[in-house]
Image (cartoon, rainbow, N blue to C red):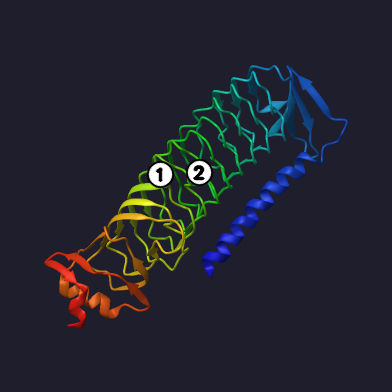
Amino acid sequence: MKKIVTVFCMAAVCTVLLQSSLAAANTADENTHEASNGIQYTLMQDGSYTVSGADSGITSLEIQSTFNGKPVKRIGFSAFADCKELTRLVIADGVVSIQEKAFFNCEKLTDLALPKTLISIGDMAFAGCKSLENITFYNGIEIIGEDAFASTGIKSASMPESVMYIGKNAFGNSDIESVSFGSDIEFLRENTFSDCEQLKDVILPDTFSKLSNMMFYNCFALKSVVIPASVTELRYDILPPALDTLTIKSDIEYANASFLNGRKIGQIVFDSGVTVCRLEISDKYSKPLLIEQIVFPANVQMLCGTFIPTADTEICFGGTVEQWRGVLSASTDLKHDFSHVKCTDGVWNAQEVTE
């Protein structure tokens, strides 16, 4: 219950931050718009400036920390959207917010320097920047909005410890190849990396409580996924179409029935720390699945759920036949088809239990 409250509180805080940022953009005096070197500024009621627009043909941009002696704190809604010729962007320290669609569809943007003071990046802020390949997130950033880097050319992303919220489809349909996360984030929203066909290296932190729906949907290059020990829920379509290895380090309290539907997996390995497996491994629901091998640790104590692998699936147990007999006798609510299990000292034959 504490974790659920924490998640809701975190989401509420992020929502408030986003709303307050947008509210600040909407409280400007209509008579305080100013322009300089092709950039428009709006003086806000708090005495700071928001960058509110630019000439569409601008090619290189440096946003300073001050304007007319006052701080520049925000890049406003759609400020540089569809600036098709913009290739270079430097944002000085002092800016704390890049708002919705700020650089939407800046297709030629290749050189981007974010400020170290940045706290939030709004929805679709850089979506469609297909030439943008490199980005550095500094510790202090907390929010990355929905579709923030969707359909970009970004190759890698390393999330600092400060990141608490990453919105739906934040990197969807991008060229991202590798990503890592800090420890302050508890889960990702739906479709975070959907259709990222180049993604092949993901490090999930031990702070994750669940993996959201369609998180790695159509990530064809991703061949190995490790589900951290902290994850207790497995949602539908979180995995790519095919994996060489799926490692499960946690006790699964809930697994959607379609968790493995249609997947081809070389090996499912339950980590040595797992003692209770509540997981459906079956092709009975809709799409067929192919699992070449399932490996249980020697210290697994109980199996719960449905384990009906295909006939070609090899099942291996790290302990002895006698230990495996004890696992089955302790198991509850188990529907299984363990015709043969390879143990360390031989092959278990399920028929022996009735002989």
Q: Say which amino acid is labelled 2.
A: Phe
Q: Is residue 68 visible?
A: no
- Nearer the viewer's eye, disc 2 or disc 1? 2
Q: Quadrant of the C terminus?
A: bottom left
Mark 2 element type: loop
Residue 88, located in which quarter of the rendered image? top right
Q: CA distance from mark 2 to mark 1?
A: 11 Å
Mark 1 element type: strand
Camera-side residue: 15 or 314? 314
How many C-alpha atoms fall within 10 Å of the one at disc 2: few (<14), some, or many (≥20)?
A: many
Q: How far across and down, in percent of the image, does residue 7 sit?
A: 56, 60
Q: How far across and down, in percent of the image, does residue 230 sit?
A: 41, 60
Relative to 243, does residue 131 appear above or below in the rendering? Answer: above
How many C-alpha atoms fall within 10 Å of the one at disc 1: few (<14), some, or many (≥20)?
A: some
Residue 342, located in which quarter of the rendered image? bottom left
| Residue, disc 2 | 193
Camera-side residue: 128 or 52? 128
